[in-house]
Amino acid sequence: MFSSRSKELSVDQTPATLAPPAGAKRNRPHSAPTIISADMVINGTLASGGDVQIDGQVEGDVRCIGLVIGDKAEVQGEIYAEDVTIRGKVIGRIRARKVSLAATSHVEGDILHEAFSVEAGAFFEGNCRHSDNPLGEDGSSRRSQISHTSGAPAALFASLSPATT
């Protein structure tokens, strides 16, 4: 179980950044997602430059690259991400490139999306609208306002904007 030999680990010495490089749609390093466990309750904005899995409760906005909301999880607030999979309950607006509602999901709010899928048995009450640019539409002034008021890095919100080609 324990040995006296120490194991050498290779660690990247460069500082980690919150936001993917400019121009990249998704550049996820091989790292584990941030997990909000089932016994955790968060009040406030959650912002991450990577993936987030929520199994607990969040009362506030969630901004990240990839988001998974577990079966027993609940989010009350706006979701702003590249890729969202919902298995639990969401009350609030969702803006994402790809949104998937599982059979166990319960969503009350509007969805602005590029790709949208719904499994049989999912509950959805609200409006959904396709957009070629769901993360950039009507969001640029709001993103800059939020980045100044919430204390989250402005680079995070800029990284979630679509890349221009």
Image (cartoon, rainbow, N blue to C red):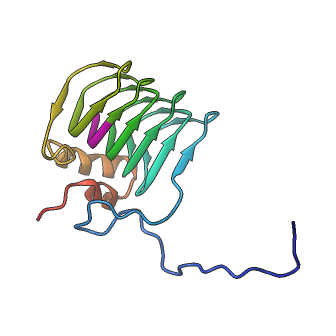
Residue 45 seen by the camera: no
Q: Main secondary structure of the magenta part?
A: strand
- Between 118 and 24, the one lying in front of the other is 118
- Between 92 and 99, the one lying in front of the other is 99
Residue 150 seen by the camera: yes
In the image, is 132 to the left or to the right of 6?
Answer: left
| Residue 31 against residue 138 in the figure, above or below | below
Residue 85: x and y, percent?
39, 38
How many numbered circles does the render carry? Answer: 0
In the image, is 109 to the left or to the right of 5?
Answer: left
| Residue 68 against residue 119 in the figure, above or below | below
Q: Quadrant of residue 9?
A: bottom right
Q: Residue at x 26, y 58 (%)?
A: 158
Q: Residue at x 19, y 44 (%)?
A: 139
Q: Which residues are magenta?
A: 94-99
Q: Residue at x 24, y 51 (%)?
A: 144
Residue 3: x and y, percent?
87, 75
Q: Where the N terminus falls, by quadrant?
A: bottom right
Residue 35: x and y, percent?
55, 46
Q: Residue at x 37, y 58 (%)?
A: 153
| Residue 164 against residue 105 in the figure, above or below | below
Residue 98 among magenta residues: yes
Q: Where the C terminus falls, by quadrant?
A: bottom left
- Between 164 and 1, the one lying in front of the other is 1
